Image: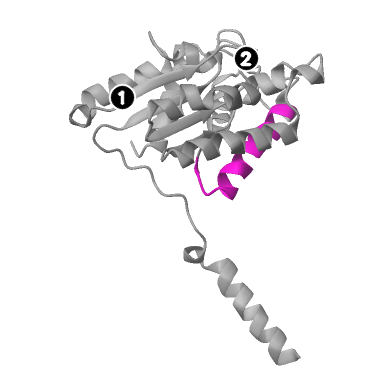
Amino acid sequence: MIRLNSVLAGVLFVAFSTPSLFAQPTPVVLKKSDRIVFLGDSITAGGNGGKGYIQVIRNEFAEKKKDLAIECIGAGISGNKVPNLQARVDKDVVAKNPTIVFIYIGINDVWHGESDPKKGTMPEAFESGLKEVIGKCTKAGAQVIVCTPTVIGELPGGANKLDTKLDEYANISRKVAKELNLNLCDLRKAFVDHIAANNPDKKASGILTTDRVHLNEAGNKLVANTMLKSLGQ
């Protein structure tokens, strides 16, 4: 029994100390004629022009990856939650024949439930719905990058009213990405870290957002830069 236990202990030690035994998400490698769809809510809708994050990414590709002729397609609709994405993923994403899909959702799933939980999305429905949307995208041949939701308020140190709830949903997105072996674009971490370092006056907004949620120019740049890192740039 002692010898068997020693063998098992050795196997477990090797298994848990050897990263190569565990599958890692396939790194995103941009290729000619890639079609990138950005699926989300009003933040994504606002990011599709002007100084929005999708336009920042388009400009980056036009300058540095012009030969690849990459197409960036915005698929954001104001007020959307995960159930809305489930209802329109076939029409707004799969029908576009994407090769890469960013799913950036979760703010409204939390925010809309602030006064009435029925108007938000319950955690179980958020997780199952997110998995359904991802499944349809991957079945269509797209490489999915899961984004965590950003902020509802910019007070540092977890002082915003919905920080705990938002962290819960961000953790669901992280969990889903890990379970499905997908690349994660951890926007929430990027925002929290930036705000901690750049909001000494503890402003509720104005650092990365215009109104605690929707992005200003700096917020759009941060999202774009974080997403570009997920694309290997």
Quadrant of the rendered image containing residue 177 = top right
* Left or right side of 95 for 155: right
Decide if residue 98 is in sight here: yes
* Left or right side of 114 for 13: left
Q: Which residues are magenta?
A: 165-183
* Left or right side of 24 for 11: right
- 10 Å crowding of disc 1: few (<14), some (14-19), many (20+): some
State the residue in front, 89 or 182: 89
Q: Main secondary structure of the magenta part?
A: helix
State the residue in front, 166 or 127: 127
Amino acid type of the residue that numbered disc 2 sits on in the rendered structure: Asp
Q: Nearer the viewer, mark 2 or mark 1?
A: 1
Is 96 located above or below residue 186 in the figure? above
Locate the N terminus and report the quarter of the image it occupies: bottom right
Q: Which mark is residue 3?
A: none
Q: Position of residue 12 (x, y in %)?
A: 63, 73
Q: Name the residue located 56 percent from the left edge and 8 percent from the top edge.
A: 210
Which residue, given by chain and number where applicable, does mark 2 sit on?
Answer: 201
Quadrant of the rendered image containing residue 195 = top right
Q: Which mark is residue 71?
A: 1
| SS at circle 1 | strand
State the residue in front, 132 or 165: 132
Q: Name the residue located 49 percent from the left edge and 58 percent from the top edge.
A: 23
| SS at circle 2 | loop
Q: Is residue 182 magenta?
A: yes
Q: Position of residue 88 (x, y in %)?
A: 55, 22
Amino acid type of the residue that numbered disc 1 sits on in the rendered structure: Glu
Decide if residue 208 is in sight here: no
Q: How many marks?
A: 2
Q: Name the residue located 48 percent from the left edge and 22 percent from the top edge.
A: 91
